Amino acid sequence: MFNLSYQTLRRDREEYNPKTGVIKANTVYYENYGCASNKSDMEIMLGILGNNGYSITQDPKIASIIIVNTCAVKQITEDKIFEKLHKMKNHSKPIIITGCLPKINLQRIADSHLDHCSLLDPASIDKIDDIVNKCLQERGQNIIFSNRPPNKPSLPKRRLNRYIEILQISEGCQGKCSYCCTRFARGKLHCFPPKTILKQIQKAIAENSVEIQLTAQDTASYNYRGYNLSNLLRDISALKGDFKVRIGMMNPDTVFKLLDEIIDVYENDKIYKFLHVPIQSGSNKILKLMKRRNTVYDFLSIVNIFRSHFPTISIATDIIVGFPSETQEDFEETLSLIKLVRPDVINISKYAPRPGTEASKMKQLDSRIVASRSRILSKHVEHIIKTQHMKMLGSYEEVYPIERTSTGTLFGRTHNYKKTFIQDVVPMGKKIRVKIIGAHQRRLDCKVLDHEVLQNP
């Protein structure tokens, strides 16, 4: 979850003169943390600022203002962000804290002597230009919170990766999970109109995006006046162009209601065979305390049905270890479930109480027990994921090289959304045919086979 991104969006090379120290236009330095929805919000804020004449720099020393788009879903992430915010005070620049933190832990911001920082919540990202202008005109704290998000798919945006369109289809959720603080920041479910979603995807395809990431707190809960996720996916799949769609997280209780429809949509070749369904615990007792609206049986049924239709589908899930009152028996049930299902991606979180949540008032487990269980589960998970990756050895795939690592290596995604490293020199964003020749904990290696693509990028 702790993810840092930088981007340079300068209008021309002459904006900053290092000899004179003159900055011709207001410049913004930003850091982004968190999930795909947060990244999408950051892209929108950059788009709005860019349209209003702001230049983006990756050097905070020459910036006029600093934006930190925060995540606070986990305690460990929040702690790292506060550490970063305190270091940024040394730059003596106005700081705007955006993202989930302002609404999740406003009290900690106040107690941490960050009263010089201005605050903007996720529902107010369309007002980023307003708050930046205020901060540049007058020092002091500015706060903009809104009760209802703007129509985000209709807003300007500047993609952090030109080949990947990250698109929020809804904001907030219907759940009341006892451990979750994200709902305090994102609010109740608000679905964006399909017309603007489809229009933005068409625009992205025209601008050479080849991967469309649909994101939300729960994509399966999308329902705009009776037009649900399966309707949206059918219309997206019908769009002209060469692209793939990655469907974001779906809660078991909501996807279960749409199971037949979603299975039918997944048959389309434009849909990545990837399913992210968080279970959180293998114990029905713990799931009830978590106020999850599903059982272990529901989760197993979803996984089994998807795998019966798509044998190579990648299953991703989330596990919270050490939830209050979790016994050794409850933990063993979680271990057994993971061994039975053998997911391809398993996100493990050590439980830590979050402000304002019901679970934070429950009797907490000893942190040593939580850490021990996390280590045990992680050890099993490493073996399971490596084994799942090895099943891909020798298979042939068509992938789009869409991202370049810090070392210059390209990677794309297989039909089931596994990360594939590409050692050959190939054009970005163009489909290539490869053979999987290596399997590791976090990636696959491949050999490029289709050289016709190389000759005609």
Image (cartoon, helix red, strand yellow):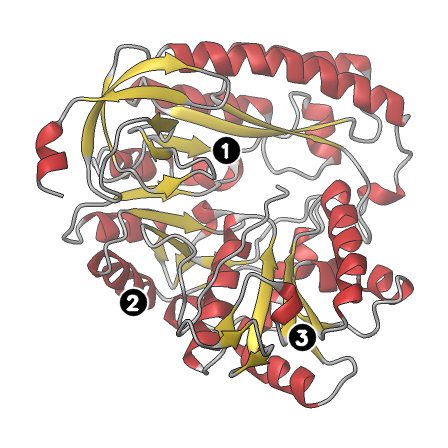
Q: Nearer the viewer, residue 400 or 193?
A: 400
Q: Are marks 1 and 3 in contact (CB under 8 Å)?
A: no
Mark 2, Cα crowd under 10 Å, few <14 / some 14-19 / many 20+, is few
Q: Residue 284: x and y, percent? A: 67, 24
The residue identified by callout 3 is 145
The residue identified by callout 2 is 195
Disc 3 marks which amino acid? Phe
Q: Secondary structure at mark 1?
A: loop
Q: Residue at x 36, y 27 (%)?
A: 420
Q: Earlier in the sequence, mark 3 or mark 2?
A: 3
Disc 1 marks which amino acid? Val
Q: Between marks 2 and 1, how big is the CA–CA gap?
A: 27 Å
Q: Nearer the viewer, residue 252 or 59?
A: 59
Q: Between marks 3 and 2, how big is the CA–CA gap?
A: 27 Å
Q: Residue 69: x and y, percent? A: 62, 60
Q: Between marks 1 and 3, how big is the CA–CA gap?
A: 31 Å
